[in-house]
């Protein structure tokens, strides 16, 4: 391999990330060779800051990298724990005086754009090889296969045989990764990364002056990097590769963050490296026998704390079964699945409804047996990393800590925030910004939901914890202050919502709560575009209702008269009216969301037309056309008439009611009318003298909507009444209880009866059941009369009181 220009001996170590076996191999090779350079797969732009990694942090930690430009937002992590081969390479390289460098492309680079984790191996590329090997070794999955082939190597050796065991491990790893790469496709992203890493290797070999060079990369890349180095030439200028810089105008950076075993574990969704990190930590520290013994006790203790009965005999049985399974499977000491299978066999006596989670890969499925879940949790561990004080952090961290200390929000417990004073509003905004950023430990228990309610305080629960600092560091990707970062997150949420106007309503209210409703012109433009393309009336109504309430009434949060919210209101009104006029369809059930959308449009036209420049005349024209259309759904026809009535448009509600007086449509038409003009209908009813005509009379001239409706219902057949009743009941739900009681009382007065309207509303039988019974009686009467068996019975009574 050496050439005249490059005489260094290069040792390539392909590793599986977070593997104790690979970490032991790296440690042994670096200590034995004492190389001039140790080159590690990692972000090359962090090489100059390797000293930050070695400040004495408590592992696990990660390099968090973020990037943002006009077209792309990206965040990724490069995690390290004590048994990560990359971590061992860095520390052992520094200990022996080697020059240590990261040699992979920066995390922001497009070649890594699809990865949220640099060390996330693409398992699908290994699938065919692993499936064949799993069948050959009679194991369930790639994790069990890996343990069987590699973990514990070196533990069998005694005395001077350790070096031979490491040589054997190195050969087997090389053979495995060569097999994987030989049968797997490498995409253009991989080849770009490998070509870049090869340039670093060639440069280091040329500069090593004959001393060894050790290269530590993911096993998938090992053979390709070696092939590129051996088949290529050193760079013409003989220098080191340039570290790519982000494009002009892009924002990015990298910081260390505390990590946790929970985030590393495949059973919680992490798709790189090894599952059960606590098991492998103990394997790294004391070997497989010690790991199995220690974790057996931990599992037993966890189960006992959960009041699961576990006796000493059960513990002995678990250890015996674990050791027996290890020998049966040809293991010198218990492997991870030997331990888990032994624990299940000894401690679980129930039938299991699911496959054991370690027989596959991925998150623990809901409904797992409690004892199995405790076993998985014990082997996962609860270790959380900590950074040494003074470790560089993004400006957001200091801003958040200062705000919390200044506002006395850095403690734990319940906090009440009063929105009516300046300090309380500032505290609320800081807490909401932290909530929007996803910082754990800040939970709102109660507070305003729309901005239009008379709610003057909020209650929060504060719970500081180990996960707060990592979240703050990662949130630093959005901005240097809580205000800027929250605004950036809201802008991102607006973009993610797309045309889902229901989600936009939530984002707008969060913007009000955070005090950043008018910070971003881009938010306004994106929302306007989403509204202009929205096709779902219910969602538009939700946005319009929330936004109009804030624009009109919000003095607490400071959004009253907001230009952004005014623009949203105007856009929603225009879009709602356009969609309503284009809707066609025959009889259908009333749709409350679209009726609420029209009601919100009515409110906007009543209260904001002049300041926002809303075209009231155009809205009245739409209402007139829709209410007269025979193709529009009945509820929209009624709502359109109600919109015109509530805005003062002349029209005859009784004539309109009579035009909709079919059993299939009358209830839905009324639902639309009541949703938009309930106040007008009720005021008309209250302003009239009750008629003495118990049947409602034949002449509707000069009578109100409810009086005419009474007459129409009385004249219905039982069958028609049964058809109309469900929609009629839904329509009257638009009246609040007190108004329904008043309407019931007027109904009694119209019949010259005395009684309580409230009692009339509290029928002791289901009205639908009674109506169905009366319809059946009427049908029977007709059949009897047709056969000459009896005179058709007169139906009377029920509808007059229903």
Image (cartoon, grey):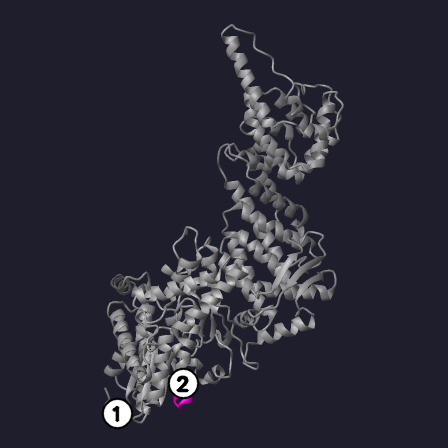
Percent coordinates x, y for residue 261 in the rendering: 47, 69
Residue 194 colored in magenta in the image: no
Could you tell me which quadrant the N terminus lies in? bottom left
Element under disc 1: loop
Element under disc 2: helix
Mark toward the start of the polypeptide (1 vs 2) = 1
Query: Residue 445's quadrant in the figure?
Result: bottom right
Percent coordinates x, y for residue 559 in the rendering: 66, 59
Q: Nearer the viewer, residue 642 or 420?
A: 420
Residue occupying the point 50% across, 9% down: 786
Q: Nearer the viewer, residue 118 or 319?
A: 319
Q: Is 625 positioned to the left or the right of 156 in the image?
A: right
Q: Is 122 positioned to the left or the right of 677 in the image?
A: left
Which residue is disc 2 drawn over? Answer: 92
Q: Is 367 positioned to the left or the right of 640 in the image?
A: left
The residue positioned farthest toward the bottom in the image shown:
209
Which residue is disc 1 drawn over? Answer: 5
Query: Residue 233's quadrant in the figure?
Result: bottom left
Residue 96 colored in magenta in the image: yes
Range of magenta residues: 91-99
Percent coordinates x, y for residue 711 in the rendering: 65, 22
Percent coordinates x, y for residue 117 in the rendering: 42, 70
382 relative to 643, above or below? below
Residue occupying the point 40% across, 60% down: 362
Query: Residue 717's quadrant in the figure?
Result: top right
């Amino acid at each position: 391999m050496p050439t005249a220009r490059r005489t260094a001996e290069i040792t390539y170590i392909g590793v599986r990330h977070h593997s104790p076996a690979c970490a032991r191999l790296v440690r042994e090779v670096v200590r034995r060779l004492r190389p001039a350079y140790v080159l590690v797969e990692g972000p090359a732009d962090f090489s100059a800051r390797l000293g930050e990694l070695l400040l004495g942090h408590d592992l696990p930690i990660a390099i968090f990298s973020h990037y943002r430009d006009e077209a792309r937002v990206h965040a990724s992590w490069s995690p390290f724990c004590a048994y990560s081969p990359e971590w061992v390479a860095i520390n052992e390289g520094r200990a022996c005086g080697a020059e240590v460098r990261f040699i992979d492309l920066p995390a922001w680079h497009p070649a890594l754009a699809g990865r949220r984790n640099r060390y996330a191996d693409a398992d699908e590329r290994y699938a065919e090889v692993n499936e064949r090997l799993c069948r050959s070794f009679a194991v369930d999955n790639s994790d069990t296969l890996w343990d069987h082939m590699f973990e514990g190597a070196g533990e069998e050796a005694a005395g001077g045989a350790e070096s031979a065991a490491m040589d054997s491990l190195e050969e087997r790893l090389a053979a495995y990764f060569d097999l994987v790469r030989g049968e797997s496709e490498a995409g253009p992203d991989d080849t770009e990364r490998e070509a870049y890493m090869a340039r670093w290797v060639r440069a280091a070999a040329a500069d090593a002056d004959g001393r060894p060079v050790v290269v530590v990369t993911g096993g998938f890349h090992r053979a390709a990097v070696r092939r590129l180095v051996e088949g290529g030439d050193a760079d013409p200028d003989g220098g080191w590769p340039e570290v790519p810089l982000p494009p002009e105008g892009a924002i990015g950076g990298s910081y260390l963050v505390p990590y946790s075993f929970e985030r590393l574990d495949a059973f919680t969704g992490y798709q790189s490296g090894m599952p059960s990190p606590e098991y492998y930590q103990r394997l790294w520290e004391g070997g497989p026998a010690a790991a199995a013994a220690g974790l057996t006790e931990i599992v037993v203790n966890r189960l006992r704390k959960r009041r699961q009965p576990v006796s000493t005999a059960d513990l002995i049985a678990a250890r015996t079964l674990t050791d027996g399974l290890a020998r049966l499977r040809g293991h010198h000491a218990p492997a991870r699945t030997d331990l888990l299978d032994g624990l299940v066999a000894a401690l679980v006596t129930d039938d299991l409804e699911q496959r054991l989670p370690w027989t596959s890969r991925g998150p623990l499925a809901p409904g797992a047996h409690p004892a199995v879940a405790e076993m998985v949790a014990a082997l996962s561990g609860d270790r959380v990393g900590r950074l040494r004080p003074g470790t560089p952090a993004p400006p957001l961290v200091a801003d958040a800590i200062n705000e919390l200390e200044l506002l006395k929000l850095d403690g734990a417990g319940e906090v009440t925030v009063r929105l009516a004073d300046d300090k309380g509003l500032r505290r609320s905004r800081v807490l909401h910004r932290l909530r929007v950023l996803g910082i754990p430990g800040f939970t709102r228990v109660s507070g305003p939901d729309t901005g239009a309610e008379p709610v003057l305080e909020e209650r929060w629960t504060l719970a500081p914890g180990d996960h707060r600092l990592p979240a703050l560091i990662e949130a630093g990707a959005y901005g240097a202050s809580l205000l800027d970062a929250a605004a950036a997150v809201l802008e991102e949420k607006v973009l993610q919502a797309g045309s889902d106007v229901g989600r936009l309503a939530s984002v707008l209210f969060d913007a009000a709560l955070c005090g950043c409703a008018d910070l971003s012109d881009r938010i306004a433009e994106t929302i306007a575009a989403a509204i202009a393309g929205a096709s779902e009336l219910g969602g538009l109504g939700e946005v319009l209702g929330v936004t109009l309430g804030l624009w009109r009434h919000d003095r607490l949060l400071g959004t009253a008269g907001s230009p952004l919210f005014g623009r949203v209101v105007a856009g929603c009104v225009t879009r709602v009216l356009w969609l309503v006029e284009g809707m066609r369809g025959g009889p259908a059930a009333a749709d409350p969301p679209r009726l609420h959308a029209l009601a919100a449009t009515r409110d906007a036209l009543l209260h904001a037309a002049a300041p926002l420049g809303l075209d009231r005349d155009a809205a009245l024209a739409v209402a007139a056309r829709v209410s007269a259309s025979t193709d529009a759904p009945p509820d929209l026809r009624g709502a359109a008439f109600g919109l015109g009535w509530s805005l003062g448009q002349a029209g005859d509600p009784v004539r309109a009611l009579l035009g909709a007086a079919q059993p299939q449509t009358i209830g839905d038409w009324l639902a639309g009318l009541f949703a938009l003009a309930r106040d007008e209908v009720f005021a008309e009813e209250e302003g009239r003298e009750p008629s003495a005509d118990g049947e409602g009379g034949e002449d509707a001239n000069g009578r109100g909507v409810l009086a005419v409706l009474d007459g129409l219902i009385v004249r219905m057949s039982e069958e028609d009444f049964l058809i109309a009743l469900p929609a009629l009941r839904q329509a009257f739900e638009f009246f609040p209880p007190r108004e329904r009681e008043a309407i019931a009382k007027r109904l009694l007065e119209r019949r010259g009866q005395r009684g309580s309207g409230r009692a009339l509303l509290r029928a002791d039988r289901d009205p639908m059941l009674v109506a169905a019974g009366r319809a059946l009686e009427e049908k029977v009467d007709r059949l009897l009369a047709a056969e000459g068996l009896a005179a058709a019975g007169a139906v009377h009574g029920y509808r007059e009181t229903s």
